[in-house]
Image (tube, rainbow, N blue to C red):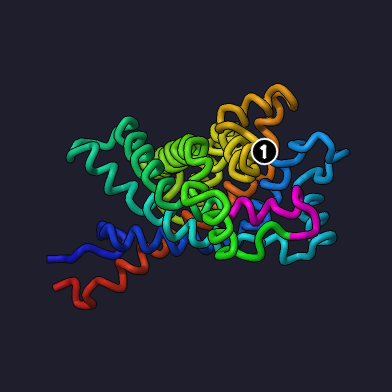
């Protein structure tokens, strides 16, 4: 009797969580400059006295940042970003399949089951990872609004100052718009990737290998960016705001609409897409590879008798 090969073996929940967390960290390191460019473009224009737009285009934003503030500024907030991936993405992605199995209860996987799984894991990960999101966004944005003197000197300094000046609840500021954003991204991203990969494999257009994972990841990134952009901009603005600037996330959204118009909700759309698409490619390719390698390492060498 033949044992299951590594490709056929079903990854355990632990393997999926570990693979998702590690793959997400690798993706974050690779794409973090794009994320910083996105944040800078999203908060641009918030202050009416800031003059002409400082950042125009993805490449010019990155070059301007590197030239005026130093190349390392592109990675400001990376430790918080990695903490976010470990605490949030590992569960959001790693538990998706487990949640999907729970909602389908042995039946054939449906679109509804996929969406429910995405909503569940996406929502849960926000509450766990929100403090890291707050620190990350503020560190990425701080020099744009607060001038040469940094608001925070580092990740743990940011946590300490936020708790000291705003209370423990300050670490969960912007949870509502981030919840909406994360649930939307999780449902769109994971469901779109899942559906595209299943369609390509079942239609025998592509094998379940690297090219298929690449195409599926880019498609998922495009869908997720388009659906989540308004919530992403509101989330960034609200999280980065000083106490009292906005009453709540809804007030932030209305202020944006009145002062800057509907286009404000799509600020940073291109770097957001480039970041999310490339993040998806790196993450999903690493995720699939890690799952297979970890399962292969757990297979007995004499699996065939």
Residue 252 in which image quadrant: top right
Residue 192 is at least partly visible in this image: no
Describe the element under mark 1 as helix, strand or loop. Answer: helix
The main secondary structure of the magenta stretch is helix
Left or right for 107, reference 35: left
- State whether residue 92 is above or below residue 9: above
Q: Residues within 10 Å of mark 1 (few under 14, many from 20)?
A: many
Left or right for 303, reference 295: left
Looking at the image, which is closer to me, 26 or 131?
Answer: 131
Residue at horizontal 47%, vertical 61%?
23
Residue at horizontal 29%, vertical 65%?
6
Q: In the displayed image of the protein, which residue is found farthest to the bottom?
A: 301
Residue 107 is at least partly visible in this image: yes
Q: Which residues are magenta?
A: 135-149
Looking at the image, which is closer to me, 276 or 285?
Answer: 276
Residue at horizontal 63%, vertical 45%?
240
Q: Is residue 165 magenta?
A: no
Q: Quadrant of the N terminus?
A: bottom left
Left or right for 179, reference 303: right
Residue at horizontal 40%, vertical 43%?
122
Q: Is residue 138 magenta?
A: yes
Residue that mark 1 sits on: 269
Q: Quadrant of the C terminus?
A: bottom left
Give percent across and percent down for residue 248. Answer: 56, 32
Looking at the image, which is closer to me, 94 or 299?
Answer: 94
- State whether residue 238 is above or below residue 40: above
Give percent across and percent down for residue 254. Answer: 63, 24
Left or right for 301, reference 289: left
């Amino acid at each position: 009797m033949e044992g299951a090969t590594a490709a056929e073996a079903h990854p355990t929940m632990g393997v999926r969580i570990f693979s998702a967390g590690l793959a997400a960290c690798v993706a974050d390191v690779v794409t973090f400059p794009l994320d910083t460019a996105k944040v800078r473009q999203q908060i641009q224009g918030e202050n009416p006295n800031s003059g002409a737009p400082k950042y125009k285009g993805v490449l010019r934003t990155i070059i301007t940042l590197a030239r005026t503030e130093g190349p390392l500024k592109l990675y400001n907030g990376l430790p918080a970003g990695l903490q976010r991936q470990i605490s949030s993405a590992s569960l959001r992605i790693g538990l998706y399949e487990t949640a999907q199995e729970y909602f389908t209860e042995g039946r054939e996987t449906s679109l509804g089951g996929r969406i429910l799984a995405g909503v569940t894991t996406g929502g849960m990960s926000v509450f766990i990872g929100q403090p890291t999101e707050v620190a990350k966004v503020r560190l990425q944005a701080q020099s744009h609004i607060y001038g040469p003197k940094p608001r925070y000197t580092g990740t743990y300094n940011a946590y300490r100052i936020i708790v000291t000046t705003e209370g423990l609840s300050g670490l969960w500021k912007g949870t509502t718009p981030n919840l909406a954003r994360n649930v939307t991204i999780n449902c769109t991203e994971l469901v779109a990737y899942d559906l595209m990969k299943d369609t390509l494999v079942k239609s025998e257009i592509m094998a379940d290998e690297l090219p298929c994972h690449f195409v599926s990841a880019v498609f998922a990134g495009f869908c997720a960016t388009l659906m989540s952009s308004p919530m992403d901009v509101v989330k960034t603005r609200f999280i980065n705001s000083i106490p009292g600037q906005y009453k709540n996330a809804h007030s932030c959204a209305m202020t944006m609409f009145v002062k800057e118009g509907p286009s404000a909700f799509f600020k940073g759309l291109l770097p957001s897409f480039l970041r999310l698409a490339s993040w998806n490619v790196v993450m999903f390719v690493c995720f699939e590879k890690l799952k297979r390698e970890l399962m292969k390492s757990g297979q007995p060498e004499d699996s065939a008798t």
